[in-house]
Image: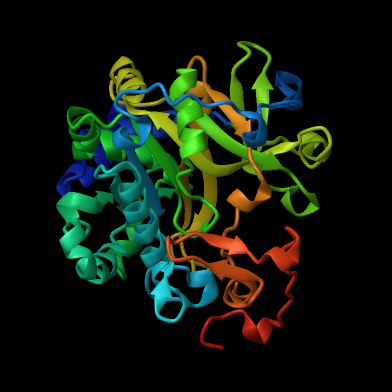
């Protein structure tokens, strides 16, 4: 059976629930790579380390922009996660930080402060999933006067894709709970979601050119006007914020340069051959990891998508799981995903900048949350979260027993 025939069942399944063409084409590209048995591996011999980069402390910016970059910017937050690893049943962004203020409130405060700075309507887009949309929009009703409540103003919906039967490579069928036949496509879905939803065209039509994208649980990821000005002046189509790897980051994806074309790329642990794992974990060799704080030129993104028939050629990542993640004896499946940071290799002239560790402060565990709620951090009126000066730049290290790993424990 040729790839087109093999894919037909997937296309029918996706169209039946109203999936957009951009999402279907992106999934088809990854599925056909799977049929070709492409591993997505990036051997050490194909890359070289990145040793030096511009740093945030040493960039120069120009005020000679008309209109100023802030007036042409959108903040996009990935908001599809439920935080199940912390025992949450709802959106992680609704987790309280201090005194009834949650992650989402801080994001809104940051955008409102940017609006005050620029006297323009800096936009906020939340990339929600089907699991987070309702609760997120309900919470945002308190910001209706700021045009941050309606889905038509703030919501970019994440797509979902079919799980693949590991033995047959056909769409998995699970009558017990059909919802388990679907999975998220990874945050690389940002690009087909922007294109397929119409948001990309709408933003460009409104004069928006620059997008700052980050994870909603990274409270250090704020739109920094200095980085925006640097990005605008550089003319680069894509900018990745990276920071120095530590021993704790050895298994996290790192930045490298491909020898074949001299482009920057992102290598995740799932893309590293076993034989190269020691080199992957060598934090002196591969010094920088992706904070997932990205800057995009939306006009360049649209051009790249048009050139690729609506698809960015992101490396495919395959994950082997079971259709019911709570039942290890259920049908074995393959879930395909892409990483949004991997788009750095899709653009000529894409760049990276080294930023302080303070711009990477994700809340992944209850220990992270406890630290955030402590007096080691300051939560400012403009939504910024800062280490207290008494910490001298050193975050607290908190270790909790297993009995405290869930929020309600």
Hey, which residue is sitting farthest top in the picture? Answer: 261
Q: Is residue 219 left or right of residue 283?
A: left
Q: Is residue 315 left or right of residue 259?
A: left
- Residue 133, percent from left and from top: 27, 62
Observer-nearest of 396 and 325: 396
- Please give the name of the residue rendered at 51% of the width and 50% of the height, measured from the top-left corner: 221
Q: Is residue 203 left or right of residue 210?
A: left
- Locate residue 81: give its quadrant: bottom left
Image quadrant occupied by the N terminus: top left
- Locate residue 303: give its quadrant: top left
Residue 315 visible to the viewer? no
Q: Is residue 383 left or right of residue 178?
A: right
- Residue 165, percent from left and from top: 42, 49
- Residue 73, percent from left and from top: 33, 37
In the displayed structure, 81 sits above or below 345; it is below
Observer-nearest of 56 and 66: 66
- Residue 311, percent from left and from top: 34, 26
- Locate residue 179: give its quadrant: bottom left
């Amino acid at each position: 059976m040729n790839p087109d025939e093999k894919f037909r069942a997937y296309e029918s399944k996706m169209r039946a629930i109203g999936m957009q063409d951009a999402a279907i084409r992106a999934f088809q590209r990854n599925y056909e790579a799977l049929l070709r048995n492409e591993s997505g591996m990036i051997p050490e011999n194909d890359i070289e380390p990145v040793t030096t980069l511009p740093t945030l402390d040493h960039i120069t910016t120009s005020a000679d922009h008309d209109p100023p970059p802030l007036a042409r910017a959108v903040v996009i937050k990935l908001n599809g996660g439920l935080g199940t690893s912390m025992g949450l049943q709802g959106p992680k962004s609704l987790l309280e930080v201090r005194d009834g203020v949650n992650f989402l409130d801080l994001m809104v405060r940051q955008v409102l402060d940017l609006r005050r700075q620029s006297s323009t309507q800096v936009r906020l887009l939340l990339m929600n999933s089907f699991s987070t949309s309702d609760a997120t929009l309900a919470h945002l009703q308190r910001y209706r006067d700021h045009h941050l409540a309606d889905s038509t103003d703030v919501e970019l919906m994440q797509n979902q894709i079919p799980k693949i039967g590991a033995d047959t490579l056909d769409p998995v069928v699970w009558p017990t709970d059909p919802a388990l036949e679907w999975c998220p496509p990874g945050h690389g879905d940002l690009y087909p979601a922007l294109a397929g939803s119409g948001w990309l065209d709408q933003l460009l039509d409104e004069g928006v050119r620059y997008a700052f994208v980050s994870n909603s649980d990274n409270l250090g990821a704020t739109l920094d006007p200095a980085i925006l000005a640097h990005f605008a002046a550089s003319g680069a189509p894509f900018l990745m914020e990276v920071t120095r790897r530590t021993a704790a980051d050895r298994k996290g994806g790192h930045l490298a340069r491909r020898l074949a074309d001299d482009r920057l790329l992102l290598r995740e642990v799932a893309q590293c051959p076993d034989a190269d794992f020691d080199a992957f974990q060598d934090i002196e060799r591969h010094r920088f990891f992706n904070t997932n704080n990205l800057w995009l030129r939306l006009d360049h993104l649209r051009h790249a998508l048009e050139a690729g028939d609506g698809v960015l050629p992101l490396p495919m990542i395959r994950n082997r799981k079971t259709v019911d993640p709570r039942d290890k004896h259920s049908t074995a499946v393959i879930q395909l995903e892409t990483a949004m940071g991997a788009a750095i290799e899709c653009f000529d002239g894409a760049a990276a900048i080294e930023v302080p560790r303070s711009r990477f402060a994700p809340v992944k565990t209850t220990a992270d949350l406890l630290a955030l709620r402590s007096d080691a951090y300051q939560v400012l009126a403009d939504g910024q979260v800062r280490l207290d000066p008494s910490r001298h730049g050193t975050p607290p290290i908190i270790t909790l027993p297993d009995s405290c790993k869930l929020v309600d424990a």
